[in-house]
Amino acid sequence: MFRALSTASSGMEAQQTQIDIIANNLANANVHGFKKARGEFQDMYYQQLRQATDDGSGGGSPIGLEVGQGVRVMASQKIFTQGDAQVTGGHYDMSIKGQGFFKVQLPDGEFGYTRAGSFAPDQQGQLVMTGSGNRLDPGISIPPNAEMVTVEPNGIVKVKLAGQQDASQVGQLTLALFQNPAGLQSLGGRMYGATEASGEPLEAIPGSEGVGSLAQGELELSNVKVVEEMISLISAQRAYEMNSKVVQTTDQMLRDANNLR
Amino acid sequence: MGNGIYRAVSGSMAQMKNLDVLANNLAHVDTPGFKADTLRFEEALDNARNGTKFVDTPGTSIRMTQGAVRRTDNPLDVALTGDGFLVVDTPDGAKLTRAGRLMIAQDGTLQTAAGLPVQGLGGGINIPPAVDGKYANLMIDEKGQVMRGDEIAGQLRVVSARSDQLNKAGADMFDVVGGVDSLEATAKPQVMQGHLEDANVNPVVAMTQMITVQRTFEALQQAVKTYREVDGQSVRRMR
């Protein structure tokens, strides 16, 4: 009977984690480039009380007796579906139409990857992420007297200087493609880090080799569907309630057993 | 009168101790850096000759799981995620803690909220004063490096220890068996400024454990009652 208590408490703990995941999705529903996470549940080790056997002559019990020990949240999978596009008209705002990530340099020298394409030139004219100031890699340098900046869907950045007739190319943006994007580690700040599970990134020109093309003047909204999250929240709450009922019932049954005499 | 009743009583006493441990865990559910205890149950030989055994509770073991990390936005709060402890100088020697509530003393030394100096890699950490106030431009990075603007004031000493090397010294500090200097520096410390680590006590789990304690205690009381009645009956029948 005590097994039921720990099984039910594992159920309640798992639903608590699920609510934590849902809460984070909802809190970040308006963050550009945010990708929602989903909790993956898994049943735990089963205790074999009696093995299924067949002694060949029609005897033995074909169905064994095994009792599970509860549930656990094994993983929180990031769902990389495309978010809706928000037209901003900003020269340095870009969204990726399809797969791939912008590569940025982190302060400690490592690289981070992001879908949030809102950039701005820093004091030296280098394009950096707004907010964290992490430099875009490969670096794009915008001259101070630039009148107009265009980013083509294939990543070529052209700048038209004041007084000039035509725009000239100042750089080529590339995107990083991962074998297993779900294996990326969330670093916060709208960035992801590569891990052993995600694999090393493949650098590709936007619009080629499976990588999405760029759209200037747009930002990718988060892929969180508020209605979906609310339904998951209700379902998690009910599951939590049902598990707490199991705890209460077990407690009552134990009390009945103790009151037999 | 057999000594079976003592076995039942030893079980009851063990459950009462268990309840004390659980209640203490629950009392510290809001203490930053607190690590829950689990009571250790062991079989102990009462009489080596006839092999009767009872339950012994030699002590508690510390559960070293990560507590939830809560954002406080206070530049002098730090939380450690993953391995590692901060080292703190007390009158009784160096101790470890996960409770990262820090403050700057009058003379600029970095101390815990209780007034104990925090150890840095080269001794204490002294924060240079700032014109705009104590908290201006105070940064503590992931590796524990403490900076006032561009000036490096020092680096927090973060060491790793296993739960069997630790004994509790108060609600948020640990003594190290063998001394703090026998411990190795944590390979990849993760210090988060502006956050605090909550106690690793899960109230749901604690409640179900308390139900188990209560029902087990009840069942053992029934056993004690039964022993008494059996003894009482045998005494009455003999006359």
Image: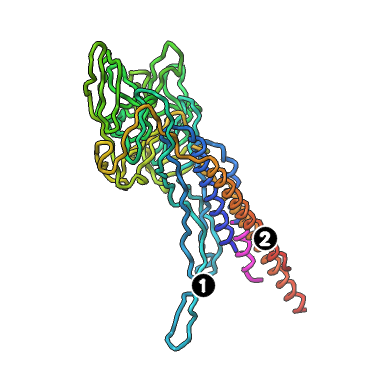
- For the residues labelled 1 and 2, the Cα–Cα distance comes to 30 Å
Which quarter of the picture shows residue B85?
top left
Where residue B186 appears, x then y in whole percent?
34, 39
Q: Chain of mark 1?
A: A
Where residue B189 appears, x then y in whole percent?
36, 36
Q: Amino acid at mark 2?
A: Glu
Residue A85 painted magenta: no
Q: Is residue B119 above or below residue B34?
A: above
Q: Secondary structure at mark 2?
A: helix
Q: Are marks 1 and 2 in contact (CB under 8 Å)?
A: no
Residue A158 visible (yes or no): yes
Work out whether residue B49 or residue A96 is closer to the camera in this orientation and state it.
A96
Work out whether residue A20 or residue B6 is closer to the camera in this orientation and state it.
A20
Q: Secondary structure at mark 1?
A: strand
For mark 2, what is the residue?
B218
Residue B144 visible (yes or no): no
Residue positioned most to the bottom = A57
Q: Are marks 1 and 2 on the same chain?
A: no
Question: Looking at the figure, which quarter contains the N terminus of chain A?
Answer: bottom right
Q: Is residue B98 left or right of residue B236?
A: left
Q: Chain of mark 2?
A: B
Numbered disc in front, either 1 or 2: 1
Residue positioned most to the front = A165
For mark 1, what is the residue?
A65
Q: Amino acid at mark 1?
A: Leu
Work out whether residue A195 or residue B175 is closer to the camera in this orientation and state it.
A195
Where residue B199 appears, x then y in whole percent?
52, 40
Question: Looking at the figure, which quarter contains the C terminus of chain A?
Answer: bottom right
Where residue A20 appears, x then y in whole percent?
52, 42
Badge 1: how crowded within 10 Å, few (<14), some, or many (20+)?
few
Residue range (magenta): B1-14
